[in-house]
Image (cartoon, helix red, strand yellow):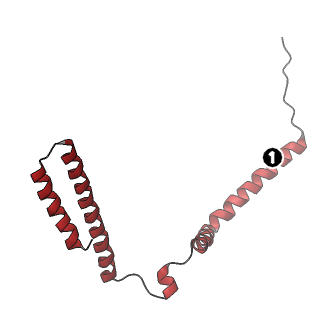
């Protein structure tokens, strides 16, 4: 029969482990109680690093519906312009590859260039 060996841990190591567990619990409790304040503090730091919004600088409120419509309209026009430019590129490639005839190419190209002129480009 083999003798049973018992793992011996010195008392001072047990005390250090116990103290660390208590410190961790206290820190978690403190962070839990002041979570809102800490989040607000970190949010302020993020905004300070990022910089103020333009509306805060000029003292204006949030954008009005008219301003939003103008911004959305500009974005739509830009998206439409990009679509037309892609169509023109596709027409060019298809014409060079012989997929469409010269007559169709010229007609479609003219129509899309007119759309671009109407948009102001």
Q: Measured from the top left, where is residue 5 in percent x and y? A: 85, 23
Answer with the quarter of the image where residue 51 lies.
bottom right
Residue 116 lies left or right of residue 36; in this view the side is left
Answer with the quarter of the image where residue 119 lies.
bottom left
Q: Measured from the top left, where is residue 55 in percent x and y? A: 47, 82
Q: At 33% across and 75% down in the image, what residue appears?
A: 71
Near-viewer residue (70 or 63): 70
Q: Measured from the top left, where is residue 69 in percent x and y? A: 29, 77
In the image, farthest residue toward the bottom: 59
* Label 1 CA crowd tier, 10 Å (few <14, some 14–19, many 20+): few
Near-viewer residue (43 or 81): 81
- Residue 49 sits above or below residue 109 on the image: below
Quarter that holds the C terminus: bottom left
- Residue 120 sits above or below residue 31 on the image: below
Answer with the quarter of the image where residue 38 lies.
bottom right
The residue identified by callout 1 is: 17
- Residue 52 sits above or below residue 88 on the image: below
Near-viewer residue (94 or 80): 94
Q: Measured from the top left, where is residue 94 in percent x and y? A: 20, 46
Q: At 84% across and 20% down in the image, what residue appears?
A: 4
Residue 5 lies left or right of residue 109; in this view the side is right
Quarter that holds the N terminus: top right
């Amino acid at each position: 029969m083999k003798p049973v060996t018992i793992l011996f841990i010195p008392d001072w190591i047990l005390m250090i482990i116990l103290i660390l567990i208590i410190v961790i619990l206290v820190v978690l409790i403190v962070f839990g109680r002041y979570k809102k304040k800490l989040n607000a503090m970190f949010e302020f730091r993020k905004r300070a690093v990022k910089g103020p919004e333009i509306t805060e600088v000029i003292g204006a409120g949030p954008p009005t519906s008219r301003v939003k419509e103008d911004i959305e309209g500009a974005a739509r026009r830009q998206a439409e312009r990009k679509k037309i430019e892609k169509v023109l590129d596709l027409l060019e490639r298809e014409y060079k590859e012989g997929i469409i005839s010269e007559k169709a190419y010229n007609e479609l190209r003219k129509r899309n260039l007119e759309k671009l002129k109407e948009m102001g480009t």
